Amino acid sequence: MPHSRTAFGCCVSGQFIYTAGGVIDRQVATSFVEWYDIDKDSWHNLPSLPQPLFSLGLSTFNTTLIAIGGFNAANKPEVKIM
């Protein structure tokens, strides 16, 4: 993973693994979004989340990546679906 972090959202769709958000450097929330191509063994960046989140749920629907809940940079729970 290009950006090392913990507490990120993760899901699998076909040959791709998606990661979003998470925590870096002593509890700093991030908005990174990346995907891994299993067949090609390579990571790629996607546009960032609208705001930093961690401990979020992540899913796909058709060609849409969906981030659900989590906590924002102020450590407050989010109830939005992005």
Image (cartoon, rainbow, N blue to C red):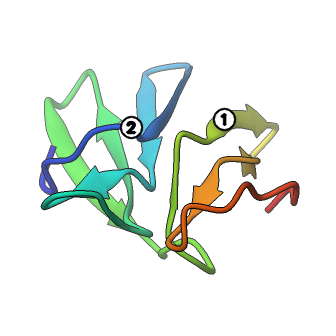
Q: Element type at marker 1?
A: strand
Determine the image quadrant of residue 6. Answer: top left
Determine the image quadrant of residue 38. Answer: top left
Where residue 54 appears, as percent x and y from the top left, is 49, 50
For label 2, the residue is: 7
Question: Residue at 41% of width from left, 29% of height from top?
Answer: 17
Q: Element type at marker 2?
A: loop
Question: Residue at 65% of width from left, 47% of height from top?
Answer: 70
Position of residue 75 in the picture relative to residue 8 (left or right): right
Of 36 and 82, nearer the camera is 82
Amino acid of disc 2: Ala
Tell me the quadrant of the picture where the C terminus can be found.
bottom right
Which of the two discs, 2 and 1, sits closer to the camera? 2
Amino acid of disc 1: Gly
Which of the two discs, 2 and 1, labels the residue nearer the N terminus?
2
Where residue 20 appears, as percent x and y from the top left, is 47, 51
Pointer 1: residues within 10 angstroms few (<14), some, or many (20+)?
Answer: some
Of 44 and 57, nearer the camera is 57
Position of residue 37 in the picture relative to residue 22 (left or right): left
Residue 57 image label:
1
Residue 67 image label:
none
Where residue 43 appears, as percent x and y from the top left, is 20, 47
Tell me the quadrant of the picture where the N terminus can be found.
top left
Compared to 15, does 24 lie above or below? below
Question: Residue at 50% of width from left, 72% of height from top?
Answer: 73
Pointer 2: residues within 10 angstroms few (<14), some, or many (20+)?
Answer: some
Question: Residue at 55% of width from left, 19% of height from top?
Answer: 14
